[in-house]
Amino acid sequence: MDIHFRRLEASDRTDTFDCGNAQLNEFLHRYALKNQHRMFGVTYVAVQAPGGQPEVIGYFTLANTSIPRQGLPQELLKGLPKYQSMPAFLLGRLAVHKNYQGKRLGEVLLSHCFEHCLAISKLTGARYLIADAKESAVTWYERYNFRKIEGSGTPHSTKMFVDLGVVNTAIKQKPTGSHMGLTRTDSAI
Amino acid sequence: MKTVKFQADLASADDAVLNTLMKELEVRSKADFLAKALALMNWAVRERKRGHKIVTMDEQGEVIRELVTPELERVAPDFSLPSVSTTWTLEEVEDFGRLASGDQPKPTAHLIRAMNRR
């Protein structure tokens, strides 16, 4: 598979994208590019171009966000200006085309997402990546060190987070063996 | 130098601005003005591509205004992510605080594989 990873571009074909989740499909078909132009979030895509025009086969959206300081322990707030919330990244959506699910493309997209966050965190100081995960995707995210945050106000999604320090540690370690078969639990990943 | 013919329809208000600017800048022809405007835009795009911000400063070096346009942000490197707000309940913030201030977990085998695949 000759797959390229980059920002979504106007010339990318998105209408053929189908991950099995209507909301995630509609976002890419109708809103991703508009949102990018309006600076509501950046969509990164995996594209293939078998017929010439690049076709999106997977995507994720990324933005800066913040965690309110009220309720956070003092040790986490050390070094932050008095009235500033804690900077963080927001992984808005992540989805893979049906035809490519189960081939670890979701994992590759997530690794790209981590790499972007690590590069940006050197400039912004943000240390945490937040994801609003659908219930069916929670187990998948947990495999990559995301942790569930209890107390969610919405019944259909769960806030999760990963410490980018853990991701940095993972880069320095060698993968062990080939026993880690990927079990698919989420239809959109 | 080889030249290319260029024709454009301008709103009358824009035409008035163009004429005023040409007088102020003492630019004699519209072609010359376009060439200078193009050079300026080209410079702005190159600077933004490098991640540099385009700002105006007062005489003391204090930033007065930053130039932000959707077009320039499109060429900005990846580290200029937009910012969005997320809603948090107090319980979520407290639980996040409890988890984040505890011991850092070890990376999972999946994460190690993902981050070492290339």
Image: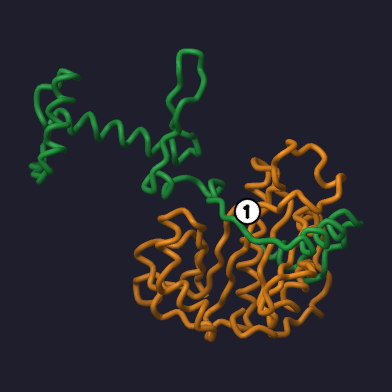
Looking at the image, which residue is at 50% across and 71% down? A2
The image quadrant of residue A164 is bottom right
Letter of the chain shown orange in the rendering: A
In the image: residue A116, left or right of residue A49 = right
The image quadrant of residue B18 is top left
Question: Nearest the camera: A114 or A134?
Answer: A134
Looking at the image, which residue is at 45% across and 66% down? A32
Name chain B's colour: green
In the image: residue B23, left or right of residue A81 = left
Residue B91 versus residue B11 in the image, above or below? below
Question: Nearest the camera: B32 or A91?
Answer: A91
Residue under circle 1?
A65
Looking at the image, which residue is at 19% across and 19% down? B25
Considering the numbered disc 1 on the image, is that residue within a helix, a strand or a loop?
Answer: strand
Residue B58 versus residue B96 in the image, above or below? above
Residue A101 appears at what percent x and percent y?
59, 83
Looking at the image, which residue is at 81% across and 53% down? A71
Quadrant containing the C terminus of chain B is bottom right
Residue A147 appears at what percent x and percent y?
79, 67
